[in-house]
Image (spheres, rainbow, N blue to C red):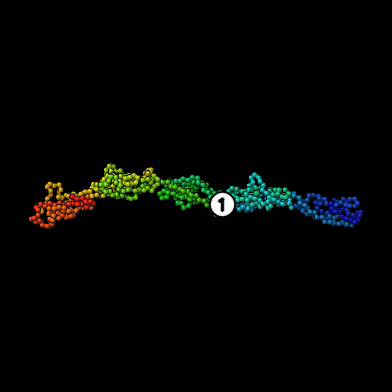
Amino acid sequence: PVAAAQDLDIGSNDIQAYIVIPENDYFHVFSQKLHEGNMNVELVLQKPLDREKQSELDFTLIATDGGSPPRSGTTQIHILVLDVNDNEPIFTQDLYTGQILESAPEGSLALTVLAKDADVGLNGDVSYQFIQGVGQNQSSFAINEKNGEILVLKTLDFESAQKHKFSIRATDGGGLSTICHVLIEVVDVNDNAPEVVVSSFNSPLPENAGPGTVVAIFTVRDQDSSVNGEIYCALEDELSFTLRPAFGNYYELVTVSTLDREERAQHIVVVTAADAGTPPLTTTHTFTVEIADVNDNAPVFNQTSYTMFVHENNVPAVLVGTVNATDADAGPNAKVSYSLVPAHPAEQEPYSCVSVNSENGHVFVLRPLDYEKLKQLEVVVSAADAGSPALSSNVTVRLVVVDENDNAPLVLHPAQDSSPPSSELVPAWAEAGDLVSKVVAADADSGQNSWLSYELLRATEPGLFAVGAQNGEVRLRRPLTDRDSVKQKLVVLVRDNGRPPLSA
């Protein structure tokens, strides 16, 4: 109801009608005469109001009397439309998409959702919540209920989940709500180094393995994506091996050339796998390749030949020296045994009197030797390894017999076994210094053992004769006289230079 207008006139000059200026679609005036001349005036709503379209209405109410000319009065009407929660929140997008680095720290903003509500006051206050449902994956995020900011709650991992899908409900203060969907893509960061996974590894490797022999098969993988997951492999400072791509991300480690254990028994092969990220991440894997020995080396003597000395009249089985050979191989292939190369027939000199220890190479003379019969001999010693087949080498051993003073001088002249004893004639006119005779002797020994000296041991006339110490010549020391005996007996001592000396 509206308060009625007042007119002091009566009758037809009193108020007759009310109108709204300007006319509108929402209100019209209903007036009704009451008793005693009063009038009931009401503004009648013709159709529902919509505050969100028009929150206020202003118009003029005119009261007109029935006079002539008619008179009127006006009043201003101001209508304030009150809000009713007749609008639900509306998201600006049905689907929100965003990207965030997997390395984003906790609390980082992933994206913001926004819902608007046309209502006002409490009815227009919007709050946001996650919808818990099957397939929803929002555990890594939190949402600000007031402003719709979606924040990182815990560390993300591209390799575990590349996309996070979930739904969000926006609810106004009056209980109306709406739903939107969110898709957050995790952007890969180069946070994973490549991995090297070995499928097979062949070690030890025979040293006679040919070029191209497969030593190992391995695969490389990187949990990152795109360029961060592209992997390149290389070897570090290794000339004996190379990498050969097989299929996919598989590689073969193969030999480049024939290996030699004696030169290098172990190879440390380092494989480096690097991705193409910025900066690149690398991983290394070490293969320790042991080289197995093959019997490809014969024993080698430490001398090209040996000379050993043995004194004659030696004791049986005397040690006279040692031969030594080494083998560059290993294990049984390097175990050396010694033997004499057989003679034909085996019992003939020199093999019958020489022996060699098969384990240590000691050389023995088995029986006494006689320098006067055998001054030196040569044997061939063989060194063989225990490989299969065995390899061997030979060396010549020369045994030199060292003379011992075991022979006394032998007087050849004058003959010692003649009967009667030998005699020499000396002319009566012989002068001092004349040669009377010569003692001839020989010694079967050698060297200083055969150097002979002569000495007049006894004589009938001690001062009549002299014997040359070096040549055994017997000469007169003075002329003969009538007083000298017609027969003179001389005893000459022949002595060698041995230690001790022997004589005759």
Q: How many marks?
A: 1
What's the residue at 77%, 53% (across, down)?
55
Q: For this view, does 31 lie left or right of residue 132?
A: right
- Residue located 7% across and 55% down the image: 482
Q: Is residue 221 left or right of residue 502?
A: right
Identity, as a three-letter code, of the amino acid under mark 1: Asp
- Residue 60's x, y, as percent? 82, 55
- Tell which of 440 and 93 is nearer to you: 440
> Residue pushed farthest right?
11
Q: Is residue 248 visible?
A: yes
Whole-percent x, y for residue 249 in the image: 52, 47
Q: Is residue 344 visible?
A: no
Position of 448 compared to 186: left or right? Answer: left
Using the image as rendered, state which of residue 311 and residue 353 is in the foreground. Answer: 311
Rendering coords of residue 263 (x, y %): 41, 50
Of residues 23 and 3, the one nearer the viewer is 3
Q: Which residue is mark 1?
A: 191
Query: Which residue is found at the position 88% from the left and 54% from the top?
Result: 15
Q: Say what secondary structure mark 1 lies in.
A: loop
Q: Residue at x 34, y 50 (%)?
A: 302
Q: Residue 178 or 465: which is nearer the viewer?
A: 465
x then y, percent, for residue 356? 32, 45
Mark 1, residues whose alpha carbon is within 10 Å: few (<14), some, or many (≥20)?
some
